[in-house]
Image (cartoon, rainbow, N blue to C red):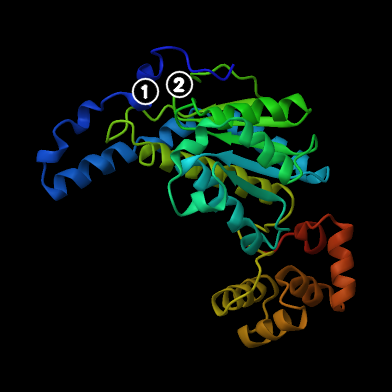
Amino acid sequence: MENTKPQARKDLTTEKQNPNSLRIDKRSIPEILEIMNKEDQSIALKIQAVLPEISRAVELAVKAIQCGGHVYYIGAGTSGRLGVLDASEIPPTFSAPRDWFQGVIAGGREALVRSIEGAEDIPEDAEKALQKVGFCSKDFLVGIASSSATPYVVHALGWARGIGASTAYIICNPKPLLDIEVDTLIAVDVGPEILTGSTRLKSGTATKLVLNMISTTTMIRIGKVYGNLMVDLDAVNQKLVDRGSRIIQQLTDLPYDKAREMLFASGKEVKTAIVMTRQQCGKEEARQLIRNNDGFLRRIIGDVAGQ
């Protein structure tokens, strides 16, 4: 299952030459940028074609978290870095526990800042890495491999499925080079790269978009958003204190200064400050109301005009 089919890698779409970028080295800077921009414009439509598969991934992510599990991204090189990036942005954006989304990259932390290309060819390291972070059957594993031929990722998915965990596979080819059974295959056919085989380009962009969709929609579905407002953001700096204050102002009609006061009175918890204001209650009562409603603010305050 984990051996590349002989002479097959050259047939991957991401390994083929792109006719639109032939002789790109002879082009002017504006011409190069125009070529890249035109190629990138096709990515959103390619993702549209796999929205049902992405939807399934969101369902599995929500289920994992609601059942006390976690969502893990695993990949090598650019794919691995993008997984770690997306996972690292969830806690401050949604005040989510740091272990809800986690990224695992072939080669470990050093591979985040320095290319360790050979790490992707050691499949057993993926199993060790997942065991080290405590991966279990309640968790959801999202394998990321633009080429669909990364031994590290393929082995991880097979092992995870073997212990009863749910799995998804994000690739940037029409179908996987290596056969692997997963719960949902997200095959974004981005076409040949602008530079032949350089999957940090269109494939990287497509991967980032898909990960954004999975993590953001998951957070929306578990009550981390009201309307399109991030009511669970972590107000850890001046920018976020300001944003949090403006959100409170918008949902309570308080003046900005008073909204800011309520933010600090709530322990910098935007959602708590909103409930305190609209329900005329104390901090602990507001927190309990939020817990009783599974974190969904709309269940407590109803519909606010325009939201």
**If the image is split into quadrants, where does the N terminus sit?**
top right
- Residue 174 circle label: 2
Q: How many marks?
A: 2
In this view, the residue in front, 207 or 153, is 153
Gap in Å between the C-alphas at discs 2 and 1? 8 Å
Residue extending farthest to the top is 6
- Residue 100 circle label: none
In this view, the residue in front, 272 or 81, is 81
The location of residue 137, given as percent across then percent down, is: 80, 34
The quadrant where residue 132 appears: top right
**If the image is split into quadrants, where does the C terminus sit?**
bottom right
119 w.r.t. 94: above or below: above
For the residues bearing labels 2 and 1, Cβ distance under 8 angstroms: yes
The location of residue 217, given as percent across then percent down, is: 63, 46
Q: Residue at x 64, y 19 (%)?
A: 181
The location of residue 219, given as percent across then percent down, is: 68, 51
In this view, the residue in front, 210 or 156, is 156
